[in-house]
Image (cartoon, rainbow, N blue to C red):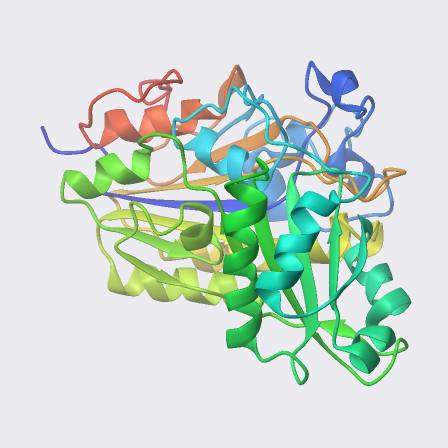
Amino acid sequence: MAPRFRRAVVIVCDGLGVGEAPDAAAFGDAGSDTLGHVLASRRVHIPHLAALGMGNLTPTFTGSREARTRGAYGKMAEKSAGKDTATGHWEMTGLVTTTPFRVFSEGFPPELIEPFKKAAGRGVLGNKSASGTEILKELGEEHLRTGSLIVYTSGDSVFQVAAHEELVPLDELYRICRAAYEIACLQFGVCRVIARPFVGKSAADFKRTPNRRDFPVPPSGDTLLDTLVRAGHPVFGVGKIEDIFTGRGITGAVHTKSDADGVDQTLKAMRELDRGLIFTNLVDFDTLYGHRNDVEGYARNLELLDARLPEILGAMGPGDVFMLTADHGCDPSDVSTDHTREHVPMLVAGPGVRPGTDLGVRETFADMGQTLAENFGLPPLPAGRSFLKTL
């Protein structure tokens, strides 16, 4: 049977939570509400997102609610043991992570750091939980003097390596991070190694560049992407999608320099790919604003996305469906700079989607993947309940 929707365009706003999850307190995130706290900070102009139902989802702010939405709207809770980018994306494609990855919020042990130093051929600075921008101010100049790598982590399961692009060329940094993956991920249970290149002459002007790369462990089983490709459907990843899925279930991909570039690349893919899945991650919400506790920057980025939304929806054909969601929260008003355990949005639009449809609160991110699996006539995924018929 032919798919109801021939092409799906899915945009993940990295870190755009819409209110605390039922188990938020267990993660230290009671009261978190990324969207609500941003919208309450000032008048945030998001008419197009509001028309899709975004403002209906936050429990702490009521000023952007719409009685009659343009499409379907709801929110989803996470079942996976964690609040990481990888586990969030894997779950939305049908794979629930039941065993949490290890977190080293006090820094990594010598048993990990010493073999890493040997493999990298360089010393290590930092080795603690830190903000990615603050640790550059603290240790960037020492890094330039000594050549030692800046290693840091957070409340998530990540091993991050920062290095100046003029001192450590990108190819070398990526090689070092692949070596770190062999140790931190395969031997110590860390979820991701992240390369964090930066530029600048002093602490006053150090700045991370768009050449970040993620090296996560692969999904532990098949995802929606694997089954789509096996069935002959193209899957195009925009942003860090290719990294998150370690290239599995991807027939084409492009890395991006910013969220604006991510939208540009999504529109380009829509012009070139008339079927299958276009899967986009917009990381600036998380990296530039959520983790930096920048409420105003987050608000501006929401407005920038909202202004581009008519371009995306205007490029939709009669057989297309558009979905907007997130992989976790990252409340910029939070006392920490870490991810927050929150519900995420599920906004659905397109010529074939009934306006004003309330999808309610979904029990798992996997409902999105299950819906797309049913649409494309694929076997059921391991988790999730389809809402295709509700659309």
The quarter of the image holding the C terminus is top left
Between 86 and 347, the one nearer to me in the picture: 86
Can you give x and y, in whole percent of width and height, for residue 173 in the image?
Answer: 58, 70
The residue positioned 51% from the left and 53% from the top of the image is 215
- Is residue 286 something one can see in this rendering? no
The residue positioned 86% from the left and 77% from the top of the image is 141
- Is residue 9 something one can see in this rendering? yes
Can you give x and y, in whole percent of width and height, for residue 28 in the image?
Answer: 81, 24
Between 379 and 204, the one nearer to me in the picture: 204
Can you give x and y, in whole percent of width and height, for residue 117 in the image?
Answer: 66, 61
Residue 79 picture quarter: top right
Residue 314 picture quarter: bottom left
Between 128 and 33, the one nearer to me in the picture: 128
Task: Farthest residue to the left: give it.
Answer: 1
The residue positioned 83% from the left and 24% from the top of the image is 31
* 222 is higher (above) or lower (below) than 313: above
Residue 142 picture quarter: bottom right
The quarter of the image holding the N terminus is top left
Can you give x and y, in whole percent of width and height, for residue 270 in the image?
Answer: 32, 59
